C-alpha cells in the first residue's frame, strides 16, 4: 500500500513531480523497466494528488 505523507513531510509541487516523471521517461528512452513502471505509477498518483487530478496544471 502506498504510504501517505504525514504532516511532517512537505508536499512537492506539481512542477517538481512532473519534472521527475519527464526525467524518468528520458532516462528510460521510452521503455520503462518493471521498477521504473512502479516508480512512474507512484509519481502519477502523487502528481494527481497535488493537481487535484487536473491535467491542466501540468501544462
Image: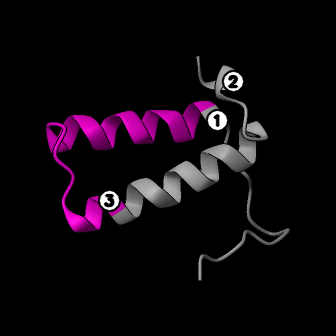
Q: Give residue 13's quadrant in the image.
A: top right
Relative to 38, does residue 29 appear above or below in the rendering? above
Which one is nearer the viewer's eye here, 26 or 11?
Answer: 26
Query: Can you identify the residue that label 1 sits on?
Result: 14
The segment highlighted magenta reads: 15-37
| Mark earlier in primary sequence (1, 3) | 1
Residue, far bottom: 1
Label 3 environment density (alpha carbons within 10 Å; few <14, some 14–19, many ≥20): some
Side of 19 relative to 49 (left or right): left
Q: Residue 3's spot in the image, x, y percent?
A: 64, 77
Residue 16 drawn in magenta: yes
Q: Residue 8's spot in the image, x, y percent?
A: 80, 69
Relative to 39, does residue 25 appear above or below in the rendering? above
Are discs 2 and 3 less than 8 Å apart at CB? no
Side of 32 relative to 24 (left or right): left
Mark identifier at residue 57: 2
How much space separates mark 1 and mark 3, taking CA atoms? 19 Å
Q: Residue at x 23, y 67 (%)?
A: 34
Mark identifier at residue 28: none
Q: Residue at x 37, y 65 (%)?
A: 38
Residue, far right: 7
Amino acid at each position: 500500500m502506498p504510504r501517505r505523507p504525514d504532516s511532517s513531510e512537505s508536499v512537492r509541487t506539481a512542477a517538481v513531480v512532473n519534472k521527475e516523471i519527464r526525467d524518468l521517461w528520458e532516462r528510460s528512452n521510452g521503455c520503462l523497466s518493471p521498477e521504473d513502471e512502479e516508480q512512474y505509477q507512484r509519481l502519477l498518483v502523487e502528481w494527481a494528488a497535488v493537481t487535484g487530478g487536473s491535467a491542466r496544471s501540468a501544462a
